[in-house]
Image (tube, rainbow, N blue to C red):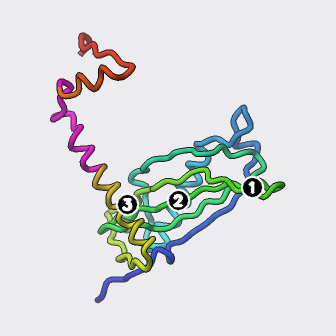
Amino acid sequence: MSQLIKTSKESSVSITELMLPANSNFSGKIHGGYILNLMDQIAFACSSKYSGKYCVTASINTVDFLNPVEVGELLTLKARVNYVGRTSMTVGIRVTSENIKTGEIKHCNSSYFLMVAKNDDGTNAPVPKLKLTSKEGVRRFIRSLDRLEMKKKRKLSFHKDEFSYENYKEEVKKHNVVIDLTDD
């Protein structure tokens, strides 16, 4: 039996929601946590659509809030699978807001969610191969791969059993921090 192959376009999902006062903070901006919740939902929908399986969030890579979202704006989230491993997928998400009165559109956030497909018994499930159909698709795939490799490298470099603060004494002196290990 041949393995299923899909394009990232087949995983594409978008949602638009009116931002209501109930989801705002005291300054009238939408809570970042509310936006993160919507991002997690669309990452689930996108990865589940692609894999045909229930998916869970394994990690989130970099969430930078670029512009505030105002009450009364339309928030649009667009997601697609950028990378696949054996059982995991990196879902790229772009968040924009639109002022209904002026039509101004702001890029609010871009983020990457690592999702894992699950079988009914909770074990990890294989996902379809990803067919890259454009130069942009190849760029997104390689960028996601690079992000995953950097994460692995960072984990190894700063593993608690291998890390020595002695190697970083001079670097630490350049920052607004004091090392006092008397409580250790």
Q: Amino acid at mark 3?
A: Ser
Q: Which residue is mark 2?
A: 93
In space, the residues marked 1 and 3 are separated at their CA atoms by 30 Å
**Does residue 135 sit above or below 103 in this rendering?**
below
Image position, residue 12 (x, y; %): 54, 71
Q: What is the quadrant of residue 55 in the picture?
A: bottom left
Question: Of residues 59 and 92, which is closer to you in this image?
Answer: 92
Q: What is the quadrant of residue 145 in the picture?
A: bottom left
Image position, residue 174 (x, y; %): 33, 22
Circle 1 SS class: loop
- Using residue 135 as the reference point, say whether residue 126 is left or right of it: left
Crowding at mark 2 (Cα within 10 Å: few <14, some 14-19, many 20+): many
Image position, residue 150 (x, y; %): 29, 50
Residue at horizontal 32 percent and vertical 83 percent from the top: 3
Is 152 within the magenta?
Answer: yes
Circle 3 SS class: helix
Crowding at mark 1 (Cα within 10 Å: few <14, some 14-19, many 20+): few
Q: Which residue is mark 1?
A: 104
Q: Amino acid at mark 2?
A: Ile
Range of residues picked out in magenta: 151-166
In space, the residues marked 1 and 2 are separated at their CA atoms by 20 Å
Crowding at mark 3 (Cα within 10 Å: few <14, some 14-19, many 20+): many
Q: Which residue is mark 3?
A: 144
**Does residue 98 sit above or below 3 in this rendering?**
above
Is 158 within the magenta?
Answer: yes
Q: Earlier in the sequence, mark 1 or mark 3?
A: 1
Residue at horizontal 70 percent and vertical 43 percent from the top: 23
Circle 2 SS class: strand
**For the residues bearing labels 1 and 2, Cβ distance under 8 angstroms:** no
